[in-house]
């Protein structure tokens, strides 16, 4: 494979913008109509996700060792859509047809062979991971039920979920969920509690402007509703173990959820156990969206925990104002010897990482979720 040829050709195709996924899905559904039911009825939100991810990953297939864990997880995760090996072949054929269409005369036999080889390598990793997961008797998805709904603010709903089978997750991981009001539209959320004996878990769902799933999830979910849950994913956002370093957590909106789970985990530690000092910054646009303010304030009675709420859009707010990442980075004291955990919407995460780096933190000490799908909690600030 010629890595430069793969990357350069994908860059040329990507210039066609929305026409690329439109052609790709038209080719896929016309040539293999049986796969249409695996996708949402409305493709508006889905349109560029699959083809964009395929192009980016396959064009970097020569560096496969760097993305193997991600591809394996992606393969296991796609079991919930009913994906089997034949479907990967259908997708690959449509990808190659799309490349040929947009590259025109630049689509040579050598380039076609390179893309076919690259896609073969990527799809094999994904299929093998899915088959191994099935052989281990891991379910493709879990059936669950809504136990309770708490409309905490205008924009945030806290939902209690109980899966029919135990779901083994770690604080900081995410699970995909499908709600009955939006079939085949899965969205990722982070459980906001440490694992419980009864297997139930709590999700913090924020209303995203224009979101096709967040609206009915926040406004319509009710006790007794059935849901489907995907396997836990992600290992980037987790508490450091026995490093002796302090931890700074920076959350935007419902990006608070994984940190609430971690704090609960720390609070359960035996009194003799070493608990790191933790400083949490929680940012919201308006004061009423600091939806866990009372609980977090009560937790400051623990000697290892401190908490700073930050509001960005209310100039009358008496506390810290501005972007939460900017406020955290500018807080008196050095974060150079800390581990930073960041969760929120994409813009919030980018700003926070830039601010912390400018303040002297090493990039290797700043951890965000990097699933390639969405930020853990899918929140925005």
Image (cartoon, rainbow, N blue to C red):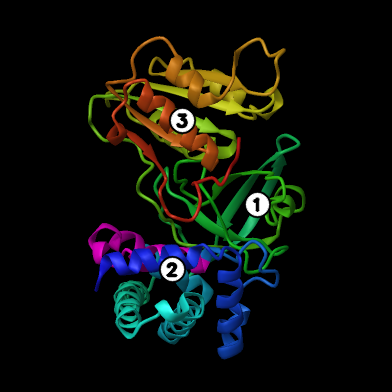
Quarter of the image holding residue 19?
A: bottom right
Q: CA distance from mark 1 to mark 2?
A: 37 Å
Label 3, label 1: how many angstroms apart (C-alpha)? 35 Å
Which of the 4 image quarters holds residue 152? top right
| Residue drawn at point x = 32 percent, y = 25 percent | 361
Label 3 belongs to which residue? Answer: 352
Answer with mark 3 or mark 2, whichever residue precedes in sequence.
Answer: 2
Q: Nearer the viewer, residue 10 or 144?
A: 10
Identify the residue at horizontal 40%, vertical 80% (top origin). Answer: 107
Q: Position of residue 54 (x, y in %)?
A: 43, 68
Q: Which residues are magenta?
A: 50-72
Other-residue count near label 3 (Cα within 10 Å), few / some / many at <14 / 14–19 / ≥20: many
Asked if residue 52 is among those painted magenta in the image, a careful observer would answer: yes
The residue identified by callout 2 is: 54
- Residue that appears at 34% across and 19% down: 335
Find disc 1 in the rendering and name its residue: 147
SS type, badge 2: helix
Q: Is residue 38 left or right of residue 363?
A: right
Secondary structure type for disc 3? helix
Position in image of residue 63 (x %, y %): 25, 61
CA separation in Å, label 3 and label 2: 28 Å
Mark number displayed over residue 290? none
Sequence-wise first label, 3 or 1: 1
Residue beneath the point at 55% across and 82% down: 28
Q: Position of residue 297 (x, y in %)?
A: 56, 18
Work out whether 218 lies above or below 44.
above
């Amino acid at each position: 494979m010629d890595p430069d040829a793969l990357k350069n050709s994908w860059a040329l195709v990507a210039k066609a913008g929305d026409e690329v996924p439109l052609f790709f899905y038209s080719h896929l559904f016309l040539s293999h109509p049986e796969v249409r039911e695996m996708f949402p009825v409305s493709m508006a939100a889905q349109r560029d996700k699959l083809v964009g991810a395929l192009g980016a990953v396959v064009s970097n297939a020569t560096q496969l060792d760097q993305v193997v864990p991600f591809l394996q997880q992606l393969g296991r995760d796609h079991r919930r859509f009913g994906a089997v090996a034949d479907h990967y072949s259908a997708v690959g054929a449509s990808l190659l047809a799309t490349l040929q269409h947009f590259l025109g005369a630049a689509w040579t036999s050598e380039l076609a062979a390179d893309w076919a080889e690259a896609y073969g390598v990527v799809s094999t990793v994904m299929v093998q991971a899915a088959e191994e997961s099935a052989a281990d008797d891991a379910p493709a998805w879990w059936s669950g039920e809504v136990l309770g709904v708490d409309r905490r603010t205008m924009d945030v709903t806290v939902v209690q979920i109980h899966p029919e089978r135990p779901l083994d997750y770690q604080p900081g991981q995410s699970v995909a969920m499908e709600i009955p009001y939006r079939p085949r539209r899965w969205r990722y959320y982070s459980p906001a509690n440490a694992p419980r004996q009864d297997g139930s878990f709590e999700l913090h769902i924020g209303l995203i402007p224009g979101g096709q799933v967040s609206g009915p999830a926040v406004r319509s979910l009710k006790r007794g509703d059935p849901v489907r849950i995907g396997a836990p994913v992600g290992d980037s956002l987790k508490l450091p173990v026995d490093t002796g370093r302090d931890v700074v957590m920076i959350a935007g909106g419902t990006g608070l959820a994984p940190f609430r789970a971690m704090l609960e985990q720390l609070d359960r530690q035996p009194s003799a156990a070493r608990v790191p000092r933790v400083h949490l910054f929680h940012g919201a646009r308006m004061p009423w969206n600091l939806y866990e303010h009372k609980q977090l304030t009560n937790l400051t009675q623990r000697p290892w925990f401190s908490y700073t709420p930050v509001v960005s859009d209310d100039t009358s707010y008496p506390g810290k104002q501005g972007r939460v990442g900017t406020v955290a980075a500018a807080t008196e004291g050095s974060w150079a010897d800390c581990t930073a955990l960041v969760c929120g919407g994409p813009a919030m995460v980018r700003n926070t990482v830039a601010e912390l780096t400018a303040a002297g933190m090493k990039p290797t000490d700043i951890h965000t979720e990097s699933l390639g799908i969405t930020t853990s909690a899918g929140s925005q600030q």
